Amino acid sequence: MSQKNNDFFNQFLNNELPKETPLESKPYEKAFTQQPVKSTPTPKIEVDLRQTVKSEPEKVEVNSPKGPGVSIKTDEKYERFINPNKKRNQIIALITGAVAVLSVIFYLIFGNKVEVPDFSAYTPSQIATWGTKNNMTMLYVEEYNHEFEKGTLISQNIAPGKKVKKGGEMTLVMSLGIDPEVIVTLPDFDETWTTDELMNWIDENNLMNATIKNLADETIEKNHFIKSDLDKDLTEIKRKTKVTFYVSTGSPFMMSMIDLKTKTEDDVKAWAQKNNVTVVYEKVAHDTVPENQIITQSIEPEIEFNPKTETLTVEVSTGPGITVPSLNSMTIEEIKAWATANTVNLMLTEKYHNSVAANTIIESSISSGEVIKKGDLVTITISLGKVGVKNFIGDTEISFMEWVDEQNLKGANITPSITYQYVDSAEKNKIIAQSLYDRRVETGANIQIVVNLGGHLTVPALTGLSEYDARQTCEYSGLTCVFTYDYSNAPDGTIASQDRQAGYNASEGDIMNVIISKGPRP
């Protein structure tokens, strides 16, 4: 074997293909590709290095399962298959393997993750479906929360939008709704609570079994609290406590108000009598509404009201208003004539005045230019001038005091001063002196009088005397003694006491009460 063939053989043994073969293979390669041959099994090559190759190598065309190629015979016993596409196949295999590895890496990094949604809009079944689809273990924690409805999501431990590895687990906090065991403090419910206020309180405290029922009531206003079925001494309840609140629908005798503005006063009176409605009539002057026609009503038309408890007030027109003239420039007779002509009620009063002359107007209840209506009351105060004091000497104290009271009602403001004297020569209980009389005095004057107590006498001492002696003494003293009997520690039949002190002054005819003893009380 030549040196060249030995080199080729050595390359063959080292599993290396030569860049060029000793034989020209290109024509055969071309013919092989152009003329396909049936595949035949590649003969097994056995190499015995101990044998010496004696002949030149022979090139033989061979079809192999690995593809078309050439088989090189080194001698009759040694042959090797040469595949010209081996390097290309190796490159393809490497690329395919790299792609597969990259695909696995991409899947492990990206393909095995899922984006977590916002579960707040999911139903429980949708959450379970998502977990199954993404091989996620969904852990549920339940707690009471009055802000979230039962079965809705409160929170999730992985924020929405975050990507997580499939096959992991998530924790979702789900709402059990309102906690029925929470304690609620009861306010002081009374008739001032309206239905709306009651409903707001129920909502704010999340009561679970509260009911509001309507109940007719004559005394409590419509849509106001009447009562509840809770114990009056109860101060707090649980949210789950069953409770019923009753609110008023008003009186069963409620009626709808009609429009009275086109009615006359007589029409309203007839309607009120028929429907048992209490009406207050107020007279008001009006330039456009005819006389006796209704101007306004306190309860508007179509409003429900209870005629048994509510009063209707209406304004009745008295026709155009009356303008008050300057009364101070008119005489009393002229004022009376004006009041009669305009159907105005006139009341004249008299009053003492230190500076305004008599029969002159001091004041009036209305001013000049003021507008009033028919039937209005006009009060005019006329001056009486200064106070004229008459002579009361010889008259009684009672007569004088009656006169003082009468003058003081007219503004005299007289202050009386009364003293008493014993005068034998004058009549008893008569005025014997007066400081001011038969003259005019200013208001607030002080008038002094002296009243005679009659003849002077001294009160006798009757205590301890016998009944007979006491009666005799009283008769001679000029006093009028009144005797009565009573139990006392004084001896029986003697005088026990007297109500006037002995030795003091008295007038003839004065009364003295005397007690005659009946002895000690048995």
Image (spheres, rainbow, N blue to C red):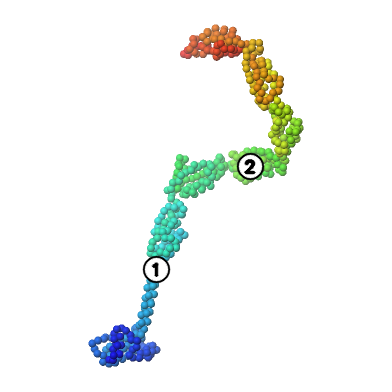
Q: Position of residue 6 (x, y in %)?
A: 28, 89
Say what amino acid the circle numbered 1 marks.
Answer: Ile
Question: Does 196 sit left or right of 340 as displayed?
Answer: left
Q: Residues within 10 Å of mark 1 (few under 14, many from 20)?
A: few
Mark 2 vs mark 1, foreground winner is 1
Residue at the image point whose x is 68% and y is 20% from the top = 436
Locate residue 410 relative to residue 241 in the image: left or right. Answer: right
Q: Is residue 35 visible?
A: no
Q: Is residue 346 above or below residue 97?
A: above
Most extreme residue toward the left, as rendered?
A: 50
Which is more N-terminal, label 1 or label 2?
A: 1
Q: Quadrant of residue 114?
A: bottom left
Q: Residue at x 63, y 40 (%)?
A: 312
In the rendered image, is residue 207 in sight?
A: yes
Quarter that holds the N terminus: bottom left
Q: Under tag 1, what secondary structure?
A: helix
Residue placed under numbered mark 2 in the picture: 298
Residue placed most toward the observer, 431 or 447: 447
Q: Is residue 372 left or right of residue 108?
A: right
SS assignment at label 2:
loop
Residue under the point 56% across and 42% down: 221
Residue 54 picture location, percent across and down: 26, 92
Q: CA distance from mark 2 to mark 1?
A: 83 Å
Residue 242 position within the rendered picture, expressed as x and y whole percent measured from the top left: 46, 46
* x, y percent for residue 506: 59, 12
Mark 2 is surrounded, within 10 Å at the Cα level, by few (under 14), some (14 to 19) or many (20 or more) other residues, namely few
Q: Can you tell which mark lies on residue 109? A: 1
